[in-house]
Amino acid sequence: MGSIYLSDGEWKLMKALWRNGPCTITQLVILLKVETNWSKHTIITMLGRLEKKGALAYEEGGKAKLFYPIVKESEVTIDETKGFLDKVYNGSISLLINTLVGNQSISKEELDELHQILQKAEVDQIDRDSN
């Protein structure tokens, strides 16, 4: 399956589906009301776009279609992250981190967490290389 890229609005709709499972259009209107105040017609349009992208599907329910995601959130997140890195930082994770550190956009807690992530990645890489 190819990469799926979502607009900001599509992310909101997909997150509602990832967190709440299959939903009808009416349920999505209610779930997204506070955050977006989208009309039923806006949600129908977005569902159509997401279906064409291969992000969701539907099954006929009792009185209404039940929409559900057919891609995992983690897969889309990876695609989006790689796309962002390529577009903004020429694919360089270190350039991204250097920018964040240089602008003091990373807290001490986040630096500690990042350090732990890198240590684990190093151990995992050594394990992979030794097998």
Image (cartoon, rainbow, N blue to C red):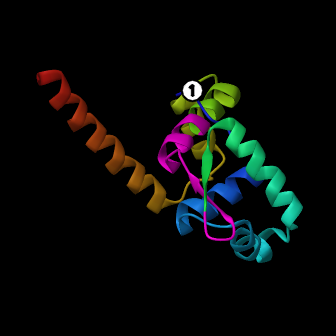
User: Which residue ends up furthest to the left in the rendered image?
Assistant: 131
Q: Decide: is 78 above or below 112.
A: above
Q: Relative to 26, is 60 on the left or the right?
A: left
- Quadrant location of residue 34? bottom right
Percent coordinates x, y for residue 91 in the rendering: 58, 24
Measured from the top left, where is residue 71 in percent x and y?
52, 44
Task: Indicate the position of residue 57 as horizontal and vertical percent values.
Answer: 61, 48
Total residue callouts = 1
Q: Is residue 119 left or right of residue 10?
A: left
Query: Circle 1 sits in a helix, a strand or a loop, which is it?
Result: loop
**Vertical placement of 2 versus 77: above or below?**
above
- Single out the residue that lies furthest toward the front: 62
x then y, percent, for residue 114: 41, 49
Residue drawn at point x = 88 percent, y = 67 percent: 39
Q: Which residues are magenta?
A: 61-80
Q: Residue at x 53, y 46 (%)?
A: 70
Residue drawn at x 55%, y 44% as measured from the top left = 77
Please say whether residue 68 is one of the residues in the magenta stretch: yes
For residue 120, above or below residue 36: above
Q: Amino acid at mark 1?
A: Gly
Q: Residues within 10 Å of mark 1 (few under 14, many from 20)?
A: few
The C terminus sits in image quarter: top left
Residue 34 in view in this figure: yes
Residue 8 makes an appearance in the image? no
Please tell me whether residue 104 belongs to the stretch shown in magenta.
no
In the image, 116 versus 43, the foreground residue is 43
Judge by depth and name the residue closer to the eye, 114 or 1: 1
Height in image: 29 above or below 11?
A: below
Residue at (79% x, 75% y) in the render = 33
For disc 1, the marked residue is 2
